[in-house]
Structures are given as structure tokens and as C-alpha cells.
Amino acid sequence: MPVARVLDAADLTRVVGRISHEILEKSHGPNDLILLGVPRRGVPLAQRIAERMHSIEGVNVPVGSLDVTMYRDDIGLRGARPLGTTDVPLGGIDDRIVVLVDDVLFSGRTIRAALDALNDIGRPRAVRLAVLIDRGHRELPIRADHVGKNIPTSRTEDVRVHLVETDGVDEVLLGPVEEDGA
Amino acid sequence: MRHLLSASDLDRDQAVMLLDTAAELASVTDRAVKKLPTLRGRTVANLFFEDSTRTRLSFEAAAKRLSADVITFTAKGSSVSKGESLKDTALTLEAMGAQAIVLRHHASGAAQRLAESGWIEASVVNAGDGTHEHPTQALLDAFTMRQHLRGGEGDLSGLRVVIVGDILHSRVARSNVWLLRTLGAQVTLVAPPTLVPFGVESWPCAVSYDLDDVLPEADAVMMLRVQAERMTAAYFPSAHEYSRRYGLDAARASALSEHAVVLHPGPMNRGMEITADVADSPRSLVVDQVANGVSVRMAVLYHVLADPGSALGEGI
């Protein structure tokens, strides 16, 4: 199976722009918003959304990261993973609208873990989910509020999001699953 | 099955990964809910055949912060005084559901024996075996040095560490020599000749008998406790003589460079190997070491219990 590029750098910029507008529209402006990226690639995505929001509204929306490794439901099955960074913006998440940002929504298990992690940090007024790609195959009753692109996939395929910050290039690829399960 | 038996089982990447994990886990202490659900439903048994305060409490706190259940066993007041063996005690703990056994034992090699005997399935973490090794202490020492001298990142390449005192009886020194070496630091041991172990030439470190000679070059000085309970022979003429030549007092500490830090694994004999003014000075990291101990042990328990692969060195 060949590897197809489903989004290029320009597409990605447009998608991030649209998600930023959508979040602002749904929240009636940037007040009380907090963007929390899920490492690794959710974090630079959250930062990009915050930058876009700044250029739209002229307001700095707090950005942080939320590592969910210690909350996963497959601990002991898939091995100890190195931890990502958790960095909650000053002032905490209590009574704020938290937007979780991730690159790919798949089984929904990562987001389940993220909701548990949020629970231990505070009590937000609302939690929303923004993802760059929704590839289907949900295993839990979880859906995204803001989706960059829906890509119907089979389980033998793999969606790979590459970002300049982490991979040196902006693109989204769809190809066969690699052996190492990346 | 995975264990942490010896600091020398860790390669550089594993050691750095453990330190990185510990650094992330340290932030749990600052949160409203000081607990992670990671090891929920798993049981950690603390099996302590030898007296210990901070190591036992530290492992207990670490396991609880990861939501593991903890069974603590201390030899005093147990069936060990009726003659129960290490094997039977371990079997008992495993029958109670322990998936990891944290072992402190007075016999060198006890942890390795327990891990490789085939008696039990549980993972074994060495919390000090005789005069052999104490790997989690070395990890927390490395973590503390990295935090203060390397910005909390990467390894310890180029760091000059001086370890002073009772090297002969010190499992802390042994574990530190191996781990610091793995992390790229240069280690110099300083001790009276009677307290330098036989075969030290084969260790990856230098040996000196003159403390004043090596202090100005050091980035970190680790003072070891003079272990009176293991002093079965006359290793030095008198306590006074020892502190005069190998103790760290304010005058000696002033020879240290500006950034140099002082560590001590505890418990300290104030006035013997270290004076109170140095132990309480800003360059002393003794309190940091204790705090970091919990984070480092959380990292070790996580990697030992969460990993079906081999993130940590397999017991040989």
C-alpha cells in the first residue's frame, strides 16, 4: 500500500485556522479558555491554535500540556513509556473552559485518560476536544467537538501527523501500519 | 521479569530515562491530588531485614503516590526472629499478592538471590544489600546532582564527584561509582587506606587519601556515614583523628568552588564526617536528596511494574 499525503503544509495551516475560529465561536470569545495539548504532537498544535487566536482576537489564551501516560489503561500491557511533560498554566483549570488538543483521534482511550488526568488537577467548567484528524474506530463513547479532517481508515492503515516542531515538516500521511507501531 | 538489582545493570539511556521519569513525577507533589492511578490494583511489598527509616518510608510513599497497595514487613517483631528464612518470607509475601518486592537485607547479594532463585515471580528492587549495592540511592543522588548542576536534563558528563569516607562498607558508594560512571561523571574516592576496599583498582574511578587535595576541583562532594555498626576492627585511631583528616568542616568547605554542592545519604553523624554548619549550609543538598528519593523510587516502581519488556537491566 502506498503512502498518501492527505494534508500538506498549506492545508494544515488552513485547518488550524478553522479550528481556532470554531473554538472561539463556540466559546463566545477567548475568555476563560485554556488550551491543553496532549504530548507529543498535541502540544505544538495547541500552541499554533493559541497563536491563531491571538492574531484573531488579540488576546493571549493560556496554553499548556497534559501528559496522560500515567493514566493509560494499558499499563503493564504495552510497556513503560517515557513520560511527556505536564504543564498547566498558572491559575489552574478551575472554572475555565479546557480545550484538549491532540493530533489523531482513534480509539478514544488517550482522551479517556486525559479526562481522568484533568480530574486530578481541577474542576473545569467544561472540557472540549479538538483534534487534527479523526480516523474513526472508537472504542469508547468519546467524540471530538472540533475536527480538522475526518479520514476514514482501515485498521491496517496508520495516520502519521508530522509537524515542523517535532518532525521538521508539516504534513499528514496515510499509509500501511509499520512494524514498530509508530 | 524485571528487577533493579544493581546500578551497574543500567546503561546510560536507561538511567537518563529513569531520571527524566522521576523529574516528571516530582511535579505530582505540587498538585491538589498528590496521587497517580498508575499502579492501582498492584501490590508492593517492602521487605526490610535491616533497620531503615528513610528508604522504607520513601519506598512506601512512592508506592502509595502511584496508588499501589503496600505491605510492609520488618524483621524486628516478625517470624524472622523465630528463624524464618528469606525464601519463606518472600513466598509468604507473594502469596499475599505482592507483584514487586523491595528488599533491604544485611547480606550482600540477597536481592540477586531472591530475583534469580526461581522462588518467586515478583519483581525485585534492591533497597540495599549488605555492603554491596543500593541502586535507588545512587539514582536519587544522580538526580539531585543533575537538578542542581546540570539544569535537570541529560546526563552528568564531565561532572567531578568526590565520595569521601567509609568506602569499604558503603553500598551507597559502590552504586554511585557505577551509576555516575555510566552517566559520564568522573569519580574520586577519598578514604583512609583501611577503609578502601580490596580490588578498588578495577573500579571505574580514582582513589585519593588526601581530601584537601581533591576538594578544589570537585563539583559535588558526597560525605558517607561512618558506619559504626559495621566497624568490627580498628579502621582508624580515633573519631577525632578521622574528622580531622576526612571530615568536612567549614574551613574545608571554603576550599570548594562557588557552585560545588555537598551530599550525604543520611543518617548523618554531625561532628564526625560532616559538621553541623556545613550540613545546614546552602550548598548542602541533604534535604533535597530525601525529597527526590520519593520521585526516583516512583520512577523505579513504575518501570519495574508497568513494563512487560525489559526497560531495566535484566538480572544477570
Image (tube, coloured by chain):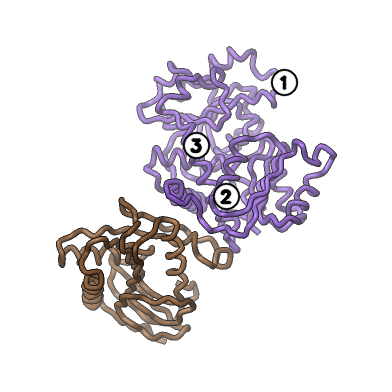
Q: Chain of mark 2?
A: B
Residue B289 - label: 3
Q: CA distance from mark 3 to mark 2?
A: 19 Å
In terms of image quadrants, where is residue B226?
top right
Q: Colour of chain B?
A: purple
State the image coordinates of residue B96 (x, y, percent, origin top left): 73, 55
* Quarter of the image with the C terminus of chain A in it: bottom left
Instruction: Describe the element under mark 2 as helix, strand or loop.
Output: helix
**Residue type beneath disc 2:** Lys
Q: Which residue is mark 2?
A: B64
Task: Residue at 44% x, 38% y: name it.
Answer: B145
**Residue type beneath disc 3:** Gln
Residue B233 - label: 1
Q: Are marks 2 and 1 in contact (CB under 8 Å)?
A: no
The lab-note entry on whether marks 2 and 1 share a chain reads yes
Instruction: Describe the element under mark 3 as helix, strand or loop.
Output: helix
